[in-house]
Amino acid sequence: MYVLKKSLGQHFLKDQNICRKIVDALQQEPLSQLLEVGPGGGALTHFLKDLPGIELKAIEIDEEKVNYLLNTYPELNGRIIHESFLDASPPFEGEFTVVGNFPYNISTQILFKVLDWKQQVPILVGMFQKEVAQRVAAPPGNKIYGVLSVLIQAFYDVKYLFDVHENCFNPPPKVKSGVIKMYRKDQVCDMKSEQHFFQLVKMAFNQRRKTLRNATRALFEDAVLKEDIFNQRAEQLSVQDFAALTFKMK
């Protein structure tokens, strides 16, 4: 057996119906290379390892879980990467799909890592703390719409699939969970550069109660700041609005 480690944010899925729903969501798109992040006790891996025509790799930081998985599923030998996902290099050449019951304590960092890999990751299906899942999918004007929403939605369409009850896990987390699916966009909004876009979005939301004019004053010339759009707050702007503004930055 294995021991759950709170320090790694481990809450292992035990509900097979939820595992099947995640696998169903994956199989709606063509895929040949699949990366599972944080397989833990292998609840999801059990279903993923036998998918026909798919090369599966899994990345797991916890040595005890790596050994448990290799003992339980010897066919995973050579397919488990014992490393932190946040430090990893892309495990495949070409495109691959990402799936996982993601550790809640690093879920935002995981999403930013996927953004770094966006050229290779057309689809992600993942379970997150419900609050994070909702934030990723939130539309403009919503009070939980923020940096994560804008940066992900600039490059991916996001669909909130379903809630997952606490009792589906061992041990039950103190928060609800949600599963989302991200589809990489064919057409990304024109922007001056990704660097400008990231800088603008982060600065705008850093002081989200202020108007855009006050929050992002350092990035624009005074003449530009007189435009009406700067009377709004960050949460009122769409991805397209932010992208268009990058061309007016200093």
Image (cartoon, helix red, strand yellow):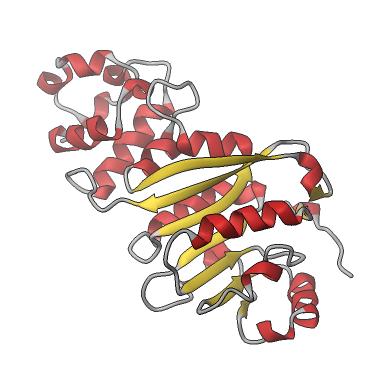
Residue 107 lies left or right of residue 197; in this view the side is: right
Q: Position of residue 209 (x, y in %)?
A: 42, 16
The quadrant of the picture occupied by the N terminus is: bottom right
- Look at the image and tell me whether residue 102 can be seen: no
Q: How many marks?
A: 0
Q: Position of residue 76 (x, y in %)?
A: 67, 82
Q: Position of residue 106 (x, y in %)?
A: 61, 50
Residue 177 lies left or right of residue 29; in this view the side is: right
Q: Is residue 114 above or below residue 58?
A: above
167, 103: nearer the viewer = 167
The quadrant of the picture occupied by the C terminus is: top left
161, 187: nearer the viewer = 161
Residue depicted at x 54% and y 69%: 35
Residue depicted at x 25% and y 28%: 218
Residue 28 lies left or right of residue 8; in this view the side is: left
- Look at the image and tell me whether residue 50 can be seen: yes
Residue 60 lies left or right of residue 13; in this view the side is: left
Q: Quadrant of residue 132?
A: top right
Q: Position of residue 137 (x, y in %)?
A: 46, 36
144, 233: nearer the viewer = 144
Q: Is residue 46 above or below residue 216?
A: below
Residue depicted at x 73% and y 36%: 175
Residue depicted at x 30% and y 50%: 185
Spot the residue most to the left: 223
